Amino acid sequence: MHEFISTTASRTRSLALPLGILAAIGIGWLTATNGFQVPGLLMALFLTVVYIAFVMTRPKLGLVSTITYCFVLFILVRESKGIPFGLGIDALLLISCLSVLLTRTRGYIWNRVNNDLCLLALVWFGITVLELANPAGASVMGWLQEMRSSALYWLLITPLVFILFRQKSDLNLFLFLVVALSVLATLNGAKQVHLGLSPGEQWFLDQGAAKTHVLFGKLRAFSFYSDAGQFGASQAHIGLVALILAFGPFKWWKKGLLLVAAGILFYGMLVSGTRGALFALVVGVAVALFLSKSIKTLILGTALVLTGLYGLKYTQIGNQHYEIRRLRSSLNPEDASLNVRFQNQKILREYLSSRPFGGGVGVIGHFGRLHNADKYLSTIPPDSYWVKVWAMYGIIGFMIWIGMVMYILGKCCGIVWGIQNKSLKTKLIALTAGSAGIIICSYGNEVINNMPSSIIVYASWALVFMGPRLDNETQPDSDE
């Protein structure tokens, strides 16, 4: 046997050179006839194999890659003129899960996923699967596309965070990633407004997005994101996180950087022209003030918030700026766009009154128009993730979903309330307040159902739920 193996290895080595030459000639010929697409694809394939090999031994790399990728996803989609790079999120999560399964003997504590947050994610996924039997008869393809963001990502990301992000340093890494990538997104949004669009961004507008992104001759910045609504809400979310962190017990230079980051992100919110982002800020600030457990801070913060809202509602301060005028319109109950949404909800209420389980997952919104064009619900824009859940799952499903979300936010508040470590407490207040803002903001847009907000919120919930264990961790804080 040993002689056979030695002979085989010797023959393989002798063939390596001629096979390599033939491969090089073949690649050269394909490049000459088809351009650089072939070597580009081969390089991409090689890098993909190398990346998967690294993730298989370092599962945390897969989770960090997922968080990063959800920010840049739509850059790839637009610059490639529509290639569905969204499947990359699914691939990264599944590779990460497979890596954890294969390396389960390396000290991962599996009982960490035995908690109510993971259980709720599993229950919601189960309800989503049961919607396949909905008598309304929605398309299975529409279900397959919609259930990814509605249920699958929550089911996959939550246990991954519990298993892989096990220390305070992992929480710090998460916060650094989301703030830094969001600031880069703001800079790109500023570039769109002041310097112009890339070919892919212009292509996006030419496909019909200009109707909602160029208003009165003014561009609503959308940066790396799916649309301006998602961009603005995410900027408000992470801007609030950075602002709360800036008031934490950290080194002075970190406070300064966080304040600068918060200012940049709020500018990004303004140039997006997203009116609903204001409510993410208001609700998030209210939650943060409540969790601070400081009567003085609560009174002062509430006074500042009410003063700001009064200035927007009853004065003309800053009205010379289009961004301020548009933000001010969010407080106008007579706004035409708002009344159209109310009218659509009235139509849905009548239609769904006899359908307590809704019209099926994927029957409304983008995938509804794509895969369920024969269904009445596909003709009505949801304009809201709350409304979308109601239309897809019915009033019963909506009540279950909103009950789950309120329970999670309530428990997050309870966990933060009991944290003793001041540095950790500030970070968890920021994540809880930001998540609460996004949930409320999703009443106006599908924010929590899209990237990067979906991944950030689900990961934030898991990190807050880990708070008591992190609070007992002996690892010192390096940022206090």
Image (cartoon, rainbow, N blue to C red):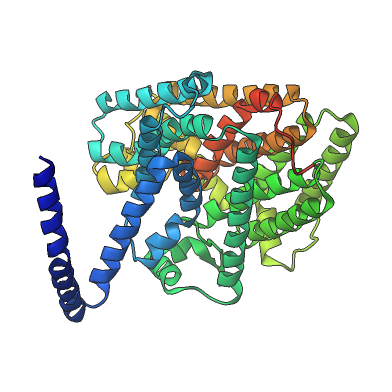
Of residue 312 and residue 240, the one placed in the foreground of this image is 240
Q: Position of residue 468 (x, y in %)?
A: 67, 23
Q: Is residue 184 left or right of residue 296?
A: left
Tell me what residue is drawn at x 11 percent, y 51 percent.
8
Q: Is residue 121 left or right of residue 177?
A: left
Tell me what residue is drawn at x 40 percent, y 32 percent.
103
Tell me what residue is drawn at x 14 percent, y 49 percent.
6
Q: Can see residue 443?
A: no
Of residue 75 and residue 180, the one placed in the foreground of this image is 180
Q: Position of residue 311 (x, y in %)?
A: 81, 52
> Which image quarter: residue 462?
top right
Tell me what residue is drawn at x 32 percent, y 31 percent.
360
Q: Position of residue 336 (x, y in %)?
A: 56, 52
Of residue 377 and residue 271, the one placed in the foreground of this image is 271
Tell which residue pokes out farthest to the bottom in this image. 32
- Quarter of the image containing the C terminus? top right
| Image label count | 0
Residue 271 to residue 121: above or below: below
Q: Is residue 28 left or right of residue 145?
A: left
Q: Is residue 14 left or right of residue 440?
A: left
Residue 125 to residue 219: above or below: above
> Which image quarter: residue 301?
top right
Q: Can see residue 178?
A: yes
- Quarter of the image containing the N terminus? top left
Q: Position of residue 251 (x, y in %)?
A: 82, 48
Tell which residue pokes out farthest to the right in this image. 296
